[in-house]
Image (cartoon, helix red, strand yellow):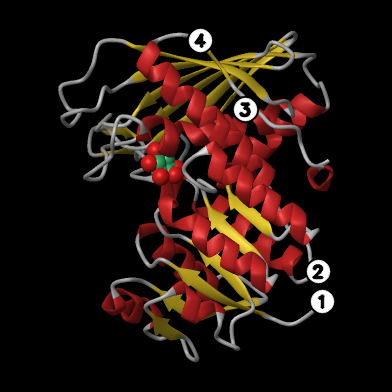
């Protein structure tokens, strides 16, 4: 094991703040060295109580700080590309929240930059792969415990959307997780995407058609569908049902504790993704830190970031046309074989 990771966290918003707390209190082998935010007061608030950490206003300053030897990028997606190039230049471990970048062309450029560097430095933050139930469904599929996987049915429901959440973001920000999950479960690339717009809820903000039904096909013909419903009000839910030749597996349903009290029975609805995937984020970040200290990455690659960006691009086109749209992918560089 090499030195402790001294991490610069870029972006102290919802996800950045969550990762700062995680790195400071639960992750072994890493410390928060710097927090960057355009809102310096927010960066300062985020480092409160973290000895030795500095608050900065630019990613460049953080990456040039001699005390920093790793970076966690948690800014909005459109800011990732520039920071990724700077971090690759420094040749340091990178954990980049999804999406890698907002479109396939820029993601491909990032892949090429990493290929030119000659080693994998970028891990993309698709945390669902680290969820215990995702992992167990993944092994049922890989080990063919129930025969061949035939279909996947996904439900992805959020209570509401933040201001500025566009119609395209239902695909780029939300269904991007299912694109990655389907590739993870099947070990195949996605070949086509179709989006059906049905009866909308009155609870969606202007310009957003919600819910949407996304139909996905993989290389071997596995069919997957996603109900993406981002103003579902009742709470947060991410669930999957997988149909096999010899059985059905469901994950992500309501869990305990099941309480009977004061004339009622039932349990609590998960409020948001931080709670639903809290444990998965911990495992993800620990896997990144452990691998980074060995000079490796511990999860989804820049190729996964690029491939899902290509799926999103097809998805947004399909949203507009209603047609089944082919996913266009460049060939996979040897580095990711
Ligand atoms: C959000 O950005 C996430 O990544 C959540 O996991 C997802 O459920 C949500 O729809 C996205 O907006």
- Checking the image for residue 182, the label placed there is 3
Residue 128: percent from left, percent from top: 57, 42
Q: First in sequence: mark 4 or mark 2?
A: 2
CB of mark 1 within 8 Å of CB of mark 2? yes
Q: First in sequence: mark 3 or mark 1?
A: 1
In the displayed structure, does residue 283 sit left or right of residue 165?
right
Q: Which residue is mark 2?
A: 294
Residue 19: percent from left, percent from top: 48, 64
Question: For numbered disc 3, what is the local secondary structure?
Answer: helix
Crowd around label 2: few <14 · some 14–19 · many ≥20 (10 Å) = few
Which tag is nearer the camera, tag 1 or tag 2? 2
User: How far is disc 4 from disc 1 in space, using C-alphas?
Assistant: 49 Å
Q: Which residue is mark 4?
A: 324
Q: Is 183 drawn above or below residue 89 in the view shown?
A: above
Crowd around label 4: few <14 · some 14–19 · many ≥20 (10 Å) = some
User: How far is disc 1 from disc 2 in space, using C-alphas?
Assistant: 6 Å
Which tag is nearer the camera, tag 4 or tag 1? 4
Which tag is nearer the camera, tag 3 or tag 4? 4
CB of mark 4 within 8 Å of CB of mark 2? no
Q: Which residue is mark 1?
A: 1
Q: First in sequence: mark 1 or mark 2?
A: 1
Residue 229: percent from left, percent from top: 34, 26
Question: For numbered disc 4, what is the local secondary structure?
Answer: loop
User: How far is disc 3 from disc 4 in space, using C-alphas?
Assistant: 17 Å
In the picture, the quarter occupied by the C terminus is: top right
Which residue is at a point 66% across and 30% down the rendered structure image?
183
């Amino acid at each position: 094991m090499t030195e402790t990771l001294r991490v610069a966290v870029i972006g102290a918003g919802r996800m950045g703040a969550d990762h700062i707390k995680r790195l400071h209190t639960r992750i072994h082998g890493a410390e928060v060295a710097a927090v960057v935010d355009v809102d310096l007061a927010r960066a300062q608030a985020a480092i409160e109580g973290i000895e030795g950490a500095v608050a900065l206003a630019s990613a460049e300053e953080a990456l040039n700080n001699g005390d920093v030897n790793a970076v966690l990028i948690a800014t909005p997606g459109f800011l990732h590309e520039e920071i990724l190039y700077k971090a690759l230049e420094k040749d340091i471990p990178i954990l980049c929240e999804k999406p890698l970048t907002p479109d396939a062309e820029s993601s491909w450029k990032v892949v090429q930059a990493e290929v030119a560097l000659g080693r994998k430095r970028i891990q993309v933050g698709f945390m669902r792969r680290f969820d215990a139930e995702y992992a167990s469904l993944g092994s049922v599929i890989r080990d063919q415990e129930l025969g061949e996987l035939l279909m996947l049915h996904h439900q992805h429901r959020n209570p509401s959307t933040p201001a500025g959440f566009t119609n395209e973001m239902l695909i780029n920000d939300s269904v991007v997780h299912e694109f990655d999950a389907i590739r993870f479960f099947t070990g195949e690339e996605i070949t086509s995407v179709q989006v059906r717009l049905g009866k909308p809820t009155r609870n969606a903000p202007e310009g957003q058609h919600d819910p949407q039904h996304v139909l996905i096909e993989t290389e071997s013909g596995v069919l997957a569908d996603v109900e993406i419903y981002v103003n579902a009000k009742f709470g947060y839910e991410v669930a999957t049902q997988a149909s096999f030749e010899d059985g059905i597996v469901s994950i992500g349903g309501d869990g305990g504790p099941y309480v009977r009290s004061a004339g009622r029975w039932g349990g609590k609805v998960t409020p948001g993704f931080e709670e639903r995937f809290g444990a998965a984020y911990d495992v993800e970040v620990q896997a990144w830190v452990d691998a980074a200290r060995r000079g490796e990455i511990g999860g989804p690659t820049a190729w996964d970031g690029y491939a899902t960006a290509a799926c999103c691009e097809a998805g947004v086109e399909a949203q507009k046309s209603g047609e089944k749209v082919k996913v266009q992918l460049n060939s996979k560089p040897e580095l990711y074989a």
